[in-house]
Image (cartoon, rainbow, N blue to C red):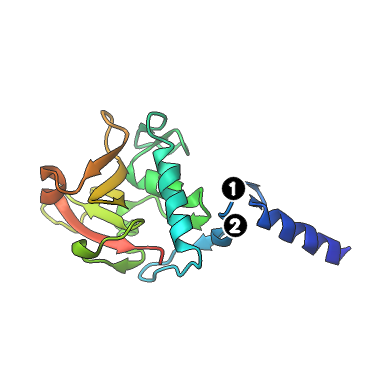
Amino acid sequence: MKKNFKAVTASLLTAGILLGGMAAPMQAEAADISAKYGSTLNISNESRVIDNIINTGKGLIGKAKYRHAYVPGKYMDCSGFIYYIFKKNGININTLDDDKQVKLGSYVPKNQLKKGDLVFFSTKKNKWDITHVGIYIGSGKILHMANTKYNVTISSLNSSWYKKYYVTARRVVK
C-alpha cells in the first residue's frame, strides 16, 4: 500500500497537481520552495519557472485591483502582487512586506538585471524605506501592481519616475 501511495503521489506531482491544489504544468519542480533572506534559490528549471511567474502576473492585467487589503488574485498592493505570483508558482517568499522582500535573494546591479529579478523603489528620504516593488521582465521593463489607476501594468525602468526612485534589485531565483 505504501509503495502504491508513493507511486500515485509521484505521478500527481509529475502531472503538475500539488497536494492542496492545482498548479500549472511544469511547475512541480519549484513546488513548496521557501525563499530566505540573503540567499538566492537555485532551481534547476529557473527559466521556465520565471516565465511562469511572469505569465501569472501578466494574466492578472485587467483583472486584479490595487488595494492595501490582500485578497489573493483579486485585491493586493505591489508587494502582495509579488508574493502572489511567486506563491502561485510554488515559491513562498514568506512576506507581503516590501521592506522585507528587499532582503530576499542576492543583490543585482541595475545593469545586470535578468528576467525574474525583483526591483525596488522608494519615494521616502530614507531610500531604504521601500515604497514599491515590481518584477523585471526584460527589455528594460517591469511588471507590477502600480496603483489604483493602472493596477497591474508593465512600465519602463527608463521613465522618469522609475529612474528617480529606483533603489535596488534582488535576485530570488537563479
In this picture, residue 145 sits left or right of residue 74: left
In the picture of the structure, the residue carrying the numbered disc 1 is 23
Q: Residues within 10 Å of mark 1 (few under 14, many from 20)?
A: some
Say which quarter of the image contains residue 118: bottom left
Determine whether 11 is above or below 88 in the image.
below
State the separation of the CA atoms marked 1 and 2: 8 Å
In this picture, residue 34 sits left or right of residue 78: right
In the picture of the structure, the residue carrying the numbered disc 2 is 28
Q: Position of residue 87 (x, y in %)?
A: 49, 51
Residue 92 is at least partly visible in this image: no
Q: Position of residue 130 (x, y in %)?
A: 23, 53
Front residue (pair 99, 3): 3
Residue 38 is at least partly visible in this image: yes
In this picture, residue 136 sits left or right of residue 173: left
Q: Residues within 10 Å of mark 2 (few under 14, many from 20)?
A: some
In this picture, residue 108 sits left or right of residue 173: left
Figure quadrant of the N terminus: bottom right
Front residue (pair 16, 164): 16
Figure quadrant of the C terminus: bottom left
Q: Position of residue 171 (x, y in %)?
A: 34, 63
**Disc assigned to residue 135:** none
Residue at 28%, 30% in the rendered image: 148
Answer whether labels 1 and 2 touch (C-beta < 8 Å): yes
Mark closer to the chain start, 1 or 2: 1
Q: Which amino acid type is shown beneath numbered disc 2?
A: Ala
Q: Position of residue 110 (x, y in %)?
A: 20, 61
Q: Which amino acid type is shown beneath numbered disc 1?
A: Ala
Tag 1 secondary structure: loop
